[in-house]
Image (cartoon, grey):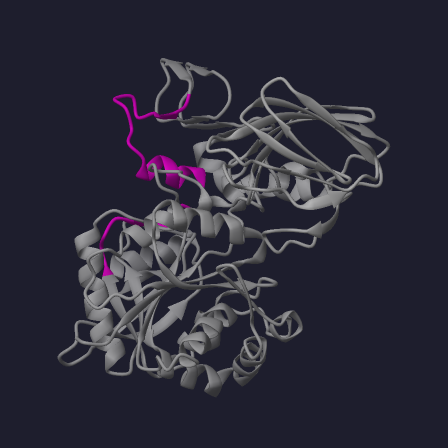
Amino acid sequence: MTATIIPIILSGGSGTRLWPLSRQLRPKQFLPLVSEQTLFQSTLLRLQGIPQLDHAVIVCNEEHRFMVAEQLHSLNIPHQGILLEPVGRNTAPAIALAALYLEAQGKTNALMLLLPADHVIQDIPVFHQAIQHAAQAAAAGYLATFGIVPLRAETGYGYIRQGATLDDITAKRVAAFVEKPDAATANRYVDSGEYLWNSGMFLFRVDRLLAELTKYHPDIVSNCRAALAHPSHDIDFIRLDQAAFTACPSISIDYAVMEKTADAVVIPLDAHWNDVGAWSAVWEVSQQDDQGNVLHGDTLTHQAQNNLVYAEHRLVTLVGVDNLVVVETKDATLVAHRDQVQDVKHIVGQLNHLQRQEANLHREVNRPWGTYDCIDVGQRFQVKRIVVKPGAKLSLQKHYHRAEHWIVVSGTAEVRCGDKTLLLTENQSTYIPLGEMHSLSNPGKVPLEIIEVQSGSYLGEDDIVRFEDAYGRTH
């Protein structure tokens, strides 16, 4: 096999069933749920060693772009571009974007390896072998998907019914894609030995995918082509025409192409795969102690078995309970039975209905320049702990409704306030009047930590007017 394999990492999704750790602006793929690396990083790292592998293309939500860039940079992983989806439109438009992006570079014969960024695969050699089989099929013009050998009768996954084996290729034709079944049907599928779980991973040649997508959904191809016609490059990011991309229908690649094409094939994969769709899956793929507990953070248990405890901020103790999931963060705590964790999404739905920020943000919020943590809030005041990375700078901005007082805890701060520039060190402070143009940067080689006290009639994050920003933000 000589064709180049280009990973296309799809890193959209919100991971609502892994709340409160996973939230809309920091979803599960960017969290270190089962190892020191995040799921996104692990997706890229497990590809190392595959022959003919080229650098990846990342497709992500615009709101997640800085997390993607930072997590790539922290592992020194090169890439071919980060395509920013202005809105979510499911997998078919996202994949079409990546294919057209590669076509524009003349890579029509390259093989696209489509991988969601939030899966766990533990048997890497078996995974690599399956990719080689899929690449052989894709090079011959087939559209390959990976079907997971089922471990049980699962009602939470779609299934693929296997057809005839292809001559000279380790793959089978797809006889049918079927929706998530009820329990009795799932048992029948597994007992038959004909069905595999639908993994949502694919491998096909760029030109073949575009030909089939043009055949069945030409509107997606034309809209994505228009969205890419005049891209703007912003640092590592490739911005698209929002109106053109928004015109795409929201549809999966399964519905758009794979269920319609006559050339779909499936590669069986038995590599300890898990899509980490809920806290029960995190328990399943994590290292358990001799009592069957999975414990993260400051935890103690007594006569407790088969629990998952994730303590982020304080001591969590369990006594005399079994099969629970307990997740503690700075601003929210989840307690659920391990058999009911699929319903966590309903809590997120309630939070969204009540317009509570716990659905979207953690108390500690990541920014491209560092982090801020809202440590106290009251009527007409708010206190934040702000950490600025070495060499980083906040935007030049002003506020209409609040004044700010900054106290340096550690590091060195360069402060611009109006027409003055100050250099502040530990225990020094300054005041930013309401309506004054100002900025903050860290000229040092260690993190800058400050305490910010805000006071005013309105303290929302949207009370920011930006004049200059090193990260291309306008709001």
Whether the magenta-drawn stretch holds residue 288 is answered as yes
Q: Name the outermost residue toward the left.
A: 168
Residue bounds of the magenta highlight: 269-297
Side (left or right) of 50 relative to 147? left
Side (left or right) of 32 relative to 46? right
Whether the magenta-drawn stretch holds residue 342 is answered as no
Q: Name the outermost residue toward the right.
A: 457
Residue 21 position, x and y percent, is 51, 36
Residue 75 position, x and y percent, is 34, 46
- 388 above or below 72? above
The residue located at (44%, 33%) in the rendering is 338
Viewer-closest of 266 and 86:
86
Residue 364 position, x and y percent, is 58, 32
Quadrant position of the N terminus in the picture: bottom left
Residue 204 position, x and y percent, is 32, 75
| Quarter of the figure with residue 184 | bottom left
The residue located at (34%, 50%) in the rendering is 76
Viewer-closest of 83 and 389:
389
| Quarter of the figure with residue 372 | top right
Specify whether residue 467 is in view: yes
The residue located at (53%, 85%) in the rendering is 218
